[in-house]
Image (tube, rainbow, N blue to C red):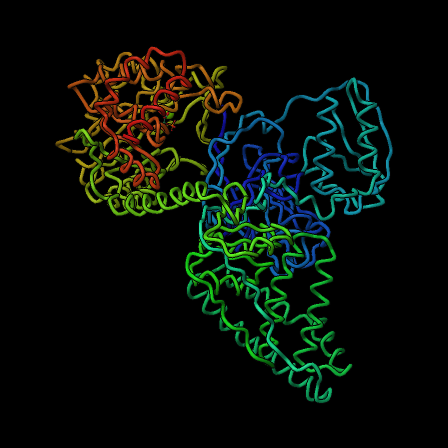
Amino acid sequence: MVTLVAITAPVDGVIVPLGEVPDPVFAEATLGDGVAIDPLGDTLCTPFDGEVVQCARSAHAVTIRHACGVELLVHLGLDTVHLEGAGIEMLVAVGQRVHEGEPLLRFEPDRLAREAMSLITPLIVVEPGGWRIDSRRGDRGERVRRGDTLLILEVAAQAATGPSRDTGPARERDVTLALESGLHARPAARLRAIAAEHAVELDVLAGERSADTRSLSSLMNLGLVNGDRVRLIARGENAEAALVAAGQLLESPEGGSHGGDVSRPLAQAGAGQWAGRVASPGLAVGPVVRYAPPLPEVPADGAGAAAETAALRDALAAVRVDLEDGMTRAERERHSSEAEILTAHLAWLDDPALAEAAERYIAAGRSAGQAWREALDDEAERLRATGNELLAGRVNDLRDLQRRVMACFGTPPVGPDIPEGAIVLADDLTPSQLIALAAARPAGLCLAAGGTTSHVAILARARNLPCLVALGPTLHEAAGEPVEAAILDAEHGLFEPRPSRERLTAVRERVEARRRRQESERETAHARAVTRDGRSIEVCANVAGAEEAELAAGEGADGIGLLRSEFLFLERDSAPDEEEQRREYQAALDALNGKPVIVRTLDIGADKQLPYLSLPAAPNPALGVRGIRLWRSQPELLDTQLRALVGVEPLDALRIMLPMVSDADEVRAVRRRLNELASELGLSATPSLGVMVEVPSAALCAASLAAEADFLSIGTNDLTQYTLAMDREDPDLAEQLDVLHPAVLRLIQATVKGAAGRCPVGVCGAAASDPLALTVLVALGIDELSVEPARVPAVKAALRELDAGALAEVLPDWLALDDGGAVRERLTAWLEARAAA
Ligand code: PEP
Ligand code: MG
């Protein structure tokens, strides 16, 4: 039995996949799996209802326990433990009940950006087992808003209790902590890993308090600091070895972790190529332009300390007004990342150390402008010398401020003269230079320095501007001779300033084709999709609720092919009542303005539990009570949902769909109940009732299902899983779990044949969005495809290119092939040949 837990974004920000977090303890999932967010706000909020079970002494991390037992560590920034709480305010306490969206901690973004390694905030599920990620939102760089669902976890019931304890003889060892920052998340995770590697039970005893190393939150709650004495107690065959390893860990000063290992392998640069890090993905071709902004010219010598000091103070005040105006504008125009950066500049401006350093140069005879220049040069050098990538990245912000204040005393720098479509090469850019450059619409950016977490990177991503950073100091050589066009491949991290003519032509074609394709796909997204041979295919959208339905309508969806109603039932203490459900379904119908909306009844069961439904544990959950099988034990839940559904208007736009059907009798039972409820409510008609084909029996008995149902929709995700007997969540089987396997295709064919003439057949599994698979589906006779809202334009466009009849002619031979790989090969070759013809 499992519970579904939705983890929401604690702050507005940009998604960073855990594997890309520049700290191996997170990237390699030593602490656990999860996701990270690059915050664009100053408050981290609670990602789900629960109890605070740990607050870091240094206020940089909080652990929340969900009612089902799963614990989530919310870790503000990287290596923030060393700040000792400076710039962070903890707003909750251990033992406090918190609700989703409630503030957990507040922080000063500029200060942390200057003083910590990174603001990237990992959210980590810290239990080693008993849960798995059911769905994961978003790609790298996707902007999310606070409260958006980032992950959905399936949590097994035993996560709440944990396995039983070994009561065998114990070995002990006393150690004195030498960990510089005490027992925080990183060493706690290592301690847990040592216990697991040695298969022992390991407890840490500190005075009266003890913690089981399986629980990171209780370990961290011990609040152990450098110099504390603790007793390690291990049970199990390898207890002695585990004690030695744990002792070594706690007695060493955590060398090498400070500052983190931020380097990830670069792409292999071939001859004539530069390898860098992808700060903003994309592909660009264009002439190379070198950008090296000069500093404003200012007089070197001052006209007396008093006058120059007053002039400097006036200049700082004027720049402050400019920055504040800029912030107001950025906030009004909702450029939150820009506002955040200007806030950082204001913080530098307020730093008394910088003003004092400049005044010392004035006292030594410099002009105000020159004194400011030298003071900020020194600070930039100091930051660079730390060797910390994030701090070095902040040098840009400092340079920006240097330029702004110097401009008060000398000739302002000339604005960038960048031709549209150029690839701009620079040593580094300040954020305001990037904003000015981006306005000139370059094709991309190549920076010799910089980091992927810098403000420049964030701004480039927000502008969809391909950008490579850290290309190295030799980058200037790339701009040496005039070249026709260079290639910026910010997908593979390569810059090619002098590509061969053939290579250039090929990449240009790719870039142009991509641009044209997206443009025309969007232009025609609202029109019907008709294949070359005249088949009209409905392209609908899969959504989680009314909000996404609105998005789908905007993308040109012909309807909603699957509204997964279980999303309405998650993260709450009781099921939504009839009125709440009705409002949500009605809003989805309203968004589609008369186009059809298929609502799937609750697909929950033995392997996907809601906390308020107590169902018996199933030994084989995927084959247990799920989907339609649930109604036998929970008839009132079905009644409420059906009542809510028949309460919407217009009823003829609504279609109800039943999940996990394995025979016609199940459909007849729901039809009977639907008719009874409709007559109780005095309705003269009932909505269409459809069936999901997700198990082989449904596919093979499609004819009898089609006799009972008004439409069929193939759930290829589950149909593939059950046909191949491969768990769709098992990463080790992911490559073999192929919808193009001839066995799956034959079942799809059987479904279409069985339904022939009786009712239409759609596909709402992921195969409907897959550019290869969708062609086969249509060739097999599918009438409707339901895809992710954002894929609607591309899917419609792909259908318009397809000669489904011609593909149908060659398909029968492919259904006799050995495996999905063989089908894929034939299909790819066939599509390429047609495209070339
Ligand atoms: C499917 O199984 O293909 C389907 C669409 O349903 P779900 O992914 O929600 O199980
Ligand atoms: Mg399914």
**Dividing the image into 4 quarters, which one contains the C terminus?**
top left
Q: Is residue 352 or residue 663 the one in the foreground?
A: 352
In the picture shown, does residue 459 fall above or below 634? below
Q: Is residue 194 or residue 659 the one in the foreground?
A: 194
Horizontally, residue 271 falls left or right of residue 760, namely: right
Residue 675, percent across and down? 19, 25
Give the residue displayed 42% in from the left and 64% down from the top.
333
Quadrant assignment, res 235: top right
In the picture shown, does residue 389 fall above or below 767? below
Q: Is residue 819 or residue 165 the one in the foreground?
A: 819
Report the image quarter containing ligand 2: top left
Quadrant assignment, res 293: bottom right
Total marks placed:
0
Q: Is residue 405 or residue 292 the one in the foreground?
A: 292
Give the residue displayed 30% in from the left and 12% down from the top.
813
Horizontally, residue 829 falls left or right of residue 495, namely: left
Residue 225, percent across and down? 79, 46
Q: Residue furthest left?
A: 684
Give the residue displayed 20% in from the left and 24% down from the top.
760
In the picture shown, does residue 62 fall above or below 115? above
Horizontally, residue 114 falls left or right of residue 341, namely: right
- Asked whether residue 680 appears in the rendered view, the answer is no
Quadrant assignment, res 772: top left
Residue 91, percent across and down? 61, 54
In the picture shown, does residue 478 fall above or below 124? below
Residue 613, percent across and down? 44, 28
Horizontally, residue 607 falls left or right of residue 742, namely: right
- Asked whether residue 755 appears in the rendered view, the answer is yes
